[in-house]
Image (spheres, rainbow, N blue to C red):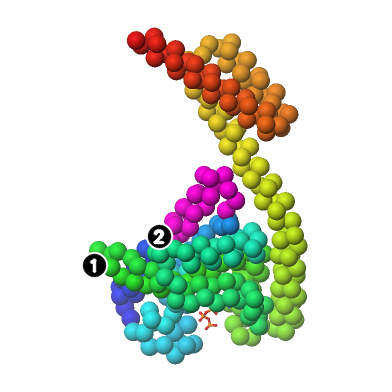
């Protein structure tokens, strides 16, 4: 296939990867805006390299004109979760969407690969609107924990280096590391609730502080310097105490002060 033809063929896959990444980013944003824990920590995507497509086609004995039908991971999305439990939540979220049509699910978490590889794979049909009209393509979504990703990334580069000739002492180490990853994920799951609540607390505190600072910034235009200095001193005092309830109350008080100034300026305009 000529390079130009490859480029044309891969164009919709690039579009799909960027659309899908954006959609999963929106999921993260939506959870954040509701002050809720997001089962998705991060999302990345890539279009498979031409050399990897050719290699896979050769390995699977696929004719060039059949590549798009048979190779399902030309468009690849990787979703990283903090905990194994989050993977289920993400799988259910994808199952419930009507813009991603699931063709196949492969659970390499319950049934890990002989290499030790663990990840949950979902193959979807995804509909794109190209200039030439609608186009349906396949994409692979890999969902895994941070720990599984750490192992997978390292093992993948070793596979790349050694191809099918990986020395036994390395495969042995990788198997041992894979077991340690299972243990690590289990251990983290035991403190999941604790970690989630700490992270929620941290995000909420950040939001309250941001709101206080915005309020102070807005008061600069209307209040006098003495009042602003007093407000700022009070903010630093409460900030040092690290008491979220007090910061929330202070934020409400600033809202009232700002409201008072707004009402006053409307009266003055009249
Ligand atoms: P790349 O470079 O990521 O694109 P098959 O070869 O038939 O077993 P198939 O049909 O492509 O695999 O599906 P599967 O098994 O779900 O694997 C798809 C992708 O999962 C692989 O793509 C890898 O990214 C990842 N993967 C699968 N098995 C392993 C493994 O043992 N170790 C690691 N690190 N990753 C794995 P590619 O095309 O192999 O590679």
Q: Nearer the viewer, residue 151 or 159?
A: 151
Q: In this view, does 183 lie above or below 239?
A: below
Q: Kindly identify which residue carries mark 2.
A: 19
Where does residue 29 sit, x and y in percent of width and height? 50, 49
Which residue is farthest left? 132
Q: Kindly identify which residue carries mark 1.
A: 132
Q: Which residue is drawn at 47% across and 64% down?
A: 96
Q: Could you say whether the residue bearing mark 1 is in a helix, strand or loop? A: loop
**Quadrant observed for ligand 1 in the rendered image:** bottom right
Where does residue 238 sit, x and y in percent of width and height? 69, 26
Which residue is farthest front? 96
Find out whether the residues at labels 1 and 2 contact each other: C-beta distance under 8 Å. Answer: no
Where does residue 107 sit, x and y in percent of width and height? 58, 76
Residue bounds of the magenta highlight? 17-38
Magenta stretch holds residue 28? yes
Q: Could you say whether the residue bearing mark 2 is in a helix, strand or loop? A: helix
Residue 117 in sight here:
no
Where does residue 68 sit, x and y in percent of width and height? 38, 79
Q: Does the residue labelled 2 lie within 8 Å of ligand 1?
A: no
Q: Residue at x 42, y 67 (%)?
A: 100
Q: Residue at x 31, y 70 (%)?
A: 135
Could you say which quadrant of the image residue 185 lies in? bottom right
């Amino acid at each position: 296939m000529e390079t130009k033809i490859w480029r044309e063929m891969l164009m919709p896959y690039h579009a799909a990867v960027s659309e899908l990444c954006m959609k999963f980013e929106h999921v993260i944003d939506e959870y954040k805006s509701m002050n809720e824990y997001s089962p998705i920590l991060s999302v990345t995507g890539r279009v498979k390299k031409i050399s990897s497509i050719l290699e896979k086609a050769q390995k699977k004995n696929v004719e060039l004109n059949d590549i798009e039908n048979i190779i399902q991971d030309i468009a690849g999305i990787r979703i990283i979760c903090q905990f194994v439990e989050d993977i289920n939540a993400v799988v259910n979220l994808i199952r419930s969407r009507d813009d991603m049509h699931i063709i196949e699910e492969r659970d390499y978490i319950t049934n890990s690969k002989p290499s030790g590889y663990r990840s949950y794979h979902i193959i979807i049909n995804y509909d794109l609107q190209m200039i030439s009209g609608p186009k349906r393509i396949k994409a692979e979504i890999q969902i895994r924990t941070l720990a599984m990703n750490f192992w997978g990334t390292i093992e993948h580069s070793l596979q790349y280096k050694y191809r099918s000739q990986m020395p036994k002492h390395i495969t042995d180490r990788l198997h041992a590391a894979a077991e340690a990853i299972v243990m690590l994920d289990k251990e983290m799951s035991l403190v999941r609730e604790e970690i989630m609540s700490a992270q929620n607390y941290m995000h909420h505190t950040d939001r309250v502080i941001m709101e206080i600072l915005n309020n102070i910034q807005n008061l600069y235009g209307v209040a006098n310097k003495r009042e602003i200095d007093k407000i700022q001193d009070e903010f630093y005092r409460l900030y040092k105490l690290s008491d979220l309830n007090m910061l929330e109350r202070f934020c409400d008080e600033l809202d009232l002060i700002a409201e008072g100034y707004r009402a006053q300026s409307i009266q003055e305009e009249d």
